[in-house]
Image (cartoon, rainbow, N blue to C red):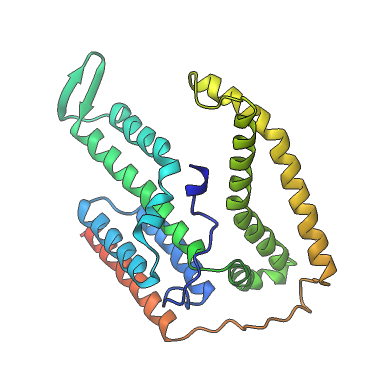
Amino acid sequence: MLRDITIGQYYPSDSPIHRLDPRTKLVITFLFIIIIFFVRYYTGYLFILAFLALIVILSGIPVKYILKGLRPLLFIILLTFFINIFFTAGETTLFTLWFIRVTKEGLRQAFFMTLRLVFLVVGTSLLTLTTSPISLTDGIESLLRPLRVIKFPSHELAMMMTIALRFIPTLLEETDKIMKAQMARGADFESGNLIQRAKAMVPLLVPLFVSAFRRADDLAMAMEARCYRGGESRTRMKVLTMGRLDVLAFASIAALIAAVLLNTYL
């Protein structure tokens, strides 16, 4: 289950989406996250779905691989759905079961919130799946470069964000190994109620933290051994440049924003 999380993983390919400038993908992802919260009608979500489908087709990433990333979040998705059904007030009652009153407005809100969560996960996963960690670091640093005027450490922040993002699948894999090792020694992580299962996960924290600190120390030593120095004197083998594909990508997100806003406010 833990290995199914796709956020932070990179899927190597030579697709048009992979060849986009990382700054383009970062800006488009940021705009995509914002525009999702402006959708109010079903047709708006159809526009979002069509946009994501186009990106998936062009990226060459298997649909099963992307949907696999939703499996660990299935509990959160279902919880969001039912909370919005039962706790959203409305006027049109569909049915009543004991003290639970399900309304048409609550069902609509639950459906919309679930779609938003799914689209957010898929959209952010596509960013990391189509962008290598090095390119992601360069893109974030380039976008934050204007903040150097106020002595903002753009390179250091970009490096920390990228390393943290990249270590998500690594730590999840390490957690899975520790769980299997403890299960082989008799540990039980699957029986009991929710609280008991949560308590059973506590013994995982100590070895997981030890492993995380060890990996961080190894990474720091490897960077020092290679004379890594960030900041002004750092050079790049590949200089970031934008081309026609980036212009088309910005045109596509502009078309999506226009379609959603027109559908929402007109």
Residue drawn at x 29%, y 38% as measured from the top left: 110
Residue drawn at x 15%, y 28% as measured from the top left: 94
Estimate the x, y position of residue 185 in percent, counting from the top left: 65, 28
Q: Is residue 13 left or right of residue 162?
A: left
Which of the 4 image quadrants contains residue 183?
top right
Residue drawn at x 67%, y 28% as measured from the top left: 203
Q: Is residue 250 left or right of residue 176?
A: left
Estimate the x, y position of residue 151 in percent, counting from the top left: 75, 67
- Give 9 or 258, whichever is nearer the viewer: 9
In the image, is residue 204 above or below residue 129? above
Residue drawn at x 62%, y 74% as measured from the top left: 142
Estimate the x, y position of residue 20 in percent, counting from the top left: 47, 77
Which of the 4 image quadrants contains residue 66?
bottom left
The quarter of the rendered structure image containing the C terminus is bottom left
In the image, is residue 170 above or below residue 250? above
The residue lying furthest to the front in this view is 184
The residue lying furthest to the top in this view is 98
Q: Is residue 66 left or right of residue 95?
A: right
